[in-house]
Amino acid sequence: MKFFDEATIEAHSGKGGDGIVAFRREKYVPRGGPSGGDGGRGGSIYVIADRNINTLIDYRYKRIHRAKNGENGQGKDCYGRGADDIQLRVPMGTVITDLGTGEQIADLAVDGQKELVCKGGNGGLGNIHFKSSVNRTPRQCTPGEEGQSRRLRLELRVLADVGLLGLPNAGKSTFIRAVSAARPKVADYPFTTLQPNLGVVRTDVSKSFVIADIPGLIEGAADGAGLGHQFLRHLQRTRLLLHIVDIAPTDESTKPVAGAKAITDELRKYDESLYRKPRWLVLNKIDLIAEDDRQRVIQDISNEYRREIGEPERTFAISALSRLGCVELTYAAMDRLDEIAKDAQAQKTEDSGSADVARA
């Protein structure tokens, strides 16, 4: 199935029903007084995160979503009926943006999370609300409020703990096959991966994390070159990035560190916060280097990486094909994710304490 990760839709909530002017006219009830009821509420539009939905494909074909209007009020103190709300179900990880204002309306990261995107108009008031001791036959009523209309951009960002970076054919798909049950396509040509792949890496009975493999990046990706720029957004939720570098490229003109620098430059151009995420250097395909030369090549590339790009948080040398070093890497990643979670919880507790002190 093709991966649909964004869509543009129109959402129109319902107009509130109008209040009316009416008077009670019955036999043996002289001067019955005002009896015009209120209009009903217009239908609102909500979006709900649903873990059972994986793509936004439905919204590629149904782009306009319109809630019904509320009914007008009636005589004999009868209020108009409110319209039903519309609930749009989207995958977890969907970000909703108002195209008119650029405002981010919702970030649906939790299953069952529900957000209002278009509020229905309130019903108008009937003349029963305007009677008083000096105005016994009011002829005032109010119309229902108009509903909201918005053009919305739905953008799916996958929920993964660890993201894989790298040039095409660096071995990202092979790595995710080696450490998880995911089975992305693997071939000996660039851009084999055309859609994000997720895999669950289990390091213990009760400990696991989700890893995301995105299409390979090339220089100019942040400006729209290649395929990877469409999926850079999927790395924004990750907590740790693994930068996979092919240390034995078949094209001799492709230098490992030069390619790595191009990728880090694209990250910085796309999103500075993404560039600042913890990032590990993973040197892949060491099985293609003779054992006698392996340590020297790893050391040379690591030193050049430090000079050209900077000190990586950690460096690993693996062979995704033979799974050499992959287990050690996944266990280290699990430990680092635990540290990041503890730091985030400590920061949250500190912020909460500061807020309590400020209120006191």
Image (spheres, grey):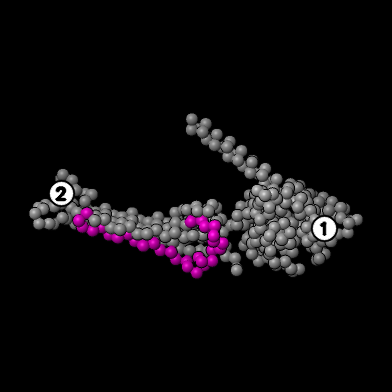
The three-letter amino acid code for the residue at tag 2 is: Arg
At 21% from the left and 49% from the top, the residue drawn is 130
Q: Earlier in the sequence, mark 2 or mark 1?
A: 2
Dot 2 crowding, Cα within 10 Å, few <14, some 14–19, many 20+: some
The residue that label 2 is drawn on is 136
The residue that label 1 is drawn on is 286
Q: Which residues are magenta?
A: 48-77
Q: Evaluate whether residue 106 shows in this view.
A: no
The verdict on residue 64 being magenta is: yes
Q: Determine the secondary structure under disc 2.
A: loop
Position of residue 17 measured from the top left corner of the image (x, y, whole percent): 30, 58
Q: Determine the secondary structure under disc 1.
A: helix
Dot 1 crowding, Cα within 10 Å, few <14, some 14–19, many 20+: many
At 15% from the left and 49% from the top, the residue drawn is 136
In space, the residues marked 2 and 1 are separated at their CA atoms by: 92 Å
Task: Please identify the residue farthest to the front as the structure is shown.
Answer: 205
Query: Which image quadrant: the N terminus?
Result: bottom right
Dividing the picture into quarters, in which one does residue 197 lie?
Answer: bottom right
Q: Evaluate whether residue 28 shows in this view.
A: yes
At 58% from the left and 36% from the top, the residue drawn is 350
The verdict on residue 68 being magenta is: yes
What main secondary structure does the magenta stretch of the protein show?
A: loop
The mark found on residue 301 in the picture is none
Position of residue 293 measured from the top left corner of the image (x, y, whole percent): 89, 56
Dividing the picture into quarters, in which one does residue 288 lie?
Answer: bottom right
Position of residue 218 measured from the top left corner of the image (x, y, whole percent): 70, 62
Position of residue 212 measured from the top left corner of the image (x, y, whole percent): 66, 57
Name the foreground residue: 29 vs 41: 29
Position of residue 210 in the picture relative to residue 90 (left or right): right
Dividing the picture into quarters, in which one does residue 150 lie?
Answer: bottom left
CB within 8 Å, label 2 to label 1: no
